[in-house]
Amino acid sequence: MRRTSSPHPHDWREGRRLRGWELHQQGWTGRAIAAALGVTPGAVSQWLTRAKRGGSEALRHHPPPGPRPKLTASQRDRLPTLLARGAEAFGFRGEVWTAARVATVIAREFGVHHHPAHVSRLLRRIGWSLQQPIQRATQRDEAAIAHWYGERWPALKRGRRPKAGPSSG
């Protein structure tokens, strides 16, 4: 993202470079600019070389581009529509979207392979959140669990009873 229209510097370093270029255009020498701005003459020389080639825009802050996204903008825009169909529409059991499931759908639909950690960042960027499935055994007996919590758990929760005599240790 380039900011060519803003006359204000992005940060103090950019402002210093732009001020150095202004001073050079007023006839200042590189050494005088370096002394006035508290930098080395070599730094001023680099700024002036860049500015002579590309103008003051060459002195502006340019963030590093980073890697090119694997998903195109149109694919990223289609993703919420695909996920809205539900996890079962893609052959998963249960209507829960996990990072691994979404990564599988992205690989099937777009041929792009993402690590699940990156998928979670991608989903947050498009306004979705991940869900963690609750996996329970099919043999689970809810009545027995409720009985255990009602009867046995309070007795265990009371903790150890104090001994009558002093410790032998």
Image (cartoon, grey):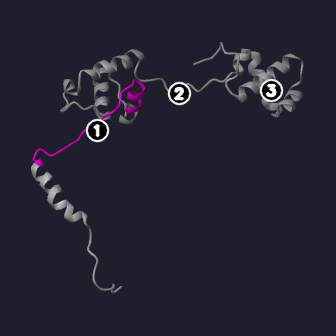
Packing grade of label 1 (10 A; few <14, some 14-19, many >=20) is few
Please tell me whether mark 2 sits on a helix, a strand or a loop. Answer: loop
- Residue 132's label in the rendered image is 1
Q: Main secondary structure of the magenta part?
A: loop
Q: CA distance from mark 1 to mark 2?
A: 31 Å
Please tell me whether mark 1 sits on a helix, a strand or a loop. Answer: loop
Residue at figure coordinates x 85%, y 20% from the top left: 24
Residue 3 in the image: state x and y as whole percent: 63, 17
Q: Are marks 1 and 2 in contact (CB under 8 Å)?
A: no
Image height check: is 8 above or below 119?
A: above
- Residue toward you, 150 or 168: 150
| Residue 61 as seen in the image, left or right of residue 97 | right
Give the quadrant of residue 60: top right
Say if the magenta span includes residue 38.
Answer: no
Please tell me whether mark 3 sits on a helix, a strand or a loop. Answer: helix
2 or 3: tag closer to the N-terminus: 3
Residue 72 in the image: state x and y as whole percent: 41, 18
- Residue toward you, 2 or 135: 135
- Magenta stretch, residue numbers: 120-142
Disc 2 target residue: 66
Q: CA distance from mark 2 to mark 3?
A: 28 Å
Residue at figure coordinates x 61%, y 17% from the top left: 2
Q: Amino acid at mark 1?
A: Gln
Q: Quadrant of the N terminus?
A: top right
Q: Amino acid at mark 3?
A: Ser
